Amino acid sequence: MESDSGNFVKGLIVGLAAELLFVACWIFVALVAGCATPPRAARPAFEPDGTNKVPRAALVVNLTRVDVSAYGGWTGDCIGTGADAATVKGALDALGIPYLALSDAEATRAGVEAAARSVGATIAPGGLLILYFSGHGGQRPAFGAELDGLDETICLYDGPLLDDTVWAMLQDVPRGVRVWLVTDCCNSGTNYRGPHNYARGVRAWWRHDPDLLHWGAARDGQNAVGSAAGGFFTIALEAAYRPGVTYREWFDAALPLVKGKQRPVSNYTGTDFSDREAFQ
């Protein structure tokens, strides 16, 4: 027959084992619960500081309204631009092209210029910068040498972005990076620069003319039309796109699909890359 001290030792051992088992179970449950928490966000497709170079990247800008104080009480209501942006972002997602998107109050003049430079800095030499805009475009008296005496503008949230400013912004794109600019707005024939292929004023030594392909929804002096479903130009582009199509083939296929009297335009500066496969 065991002694009382032996029974005490056995009881102590059993008690400790139970405690250890309880702790082990608690740790196991905690680990399982921890595994059920959402994973950390994946590394972004590109870094804003340009440390992770990519072959293609885009900036998508749309405005459904503007700051009334910047436009003398005009609200700039523009139905359908949200649908346009969704169409473009869906295409970029499908193709695996990273992008930044700015809308309404985010799309200020300083914000758009900074975003374009930030995205451009992420692209490797030989790559493609895609700039897309959907909203209003206007005209204003020009102080420079414009044949029609007017500057074309892109209506951003806090004021118009002049074609001269757009051109200076494009000249800051890193050398070797091609630019595809699509503007679905009124007066978009030459809203990236003046009507002549010349540099304006005294060109700074560090600036260079980009290899640029531009598609505008309407000629200067023309309206670009749309509906709640989107701009007619963007809708036509979506309908005409086929995998493997060249830029030139795509634009030509979209032209007859554009409703109304607007006449989209395609032009370029630098090296023409319109015979390359679209998005490449």
Image: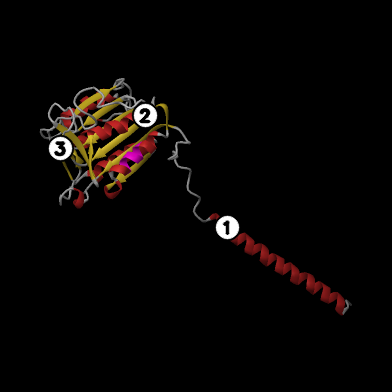
Residue 15 position within the rendered picture, expressed as x and y whole percent measured from the top left: 74, 72
Q: Position of residue 104 (x, y in %)?
A: 26, 48
In front: label 1 or label 3:
3
Please provide the residue range marked out in magenta.
Answer: 111-116
Outermost residue toward the front in this view: 202
Q: CA distance from mark 2 to mark 1?
A: 45 Å
Q: Is residue 20 left or right of residue 37?
A: right
Residue at image coords 16%, 28%: 146
Tell me the residue at 38%/34% (across/down). 120
Q: Nearer the viewer, residue 55 or 13?
A: 55
Tag on residue 140? 3
Q: Amino acid at mark 3?
A: Arg
Q: Amino acid at mark 1?
A: Val
Packing grade of label 3 (10 A; few <14, some 14-19, many >=20) is few
Q: Is residue 179 above or below residue 6?
A: above
Q: Secondary structure at mark 1?
A: helix
Circle on res. 128:
2
- Asked if residue 97 shows in the view, the reply is no
Gap between marks 1 and 3 measured at Cα: 64 Å
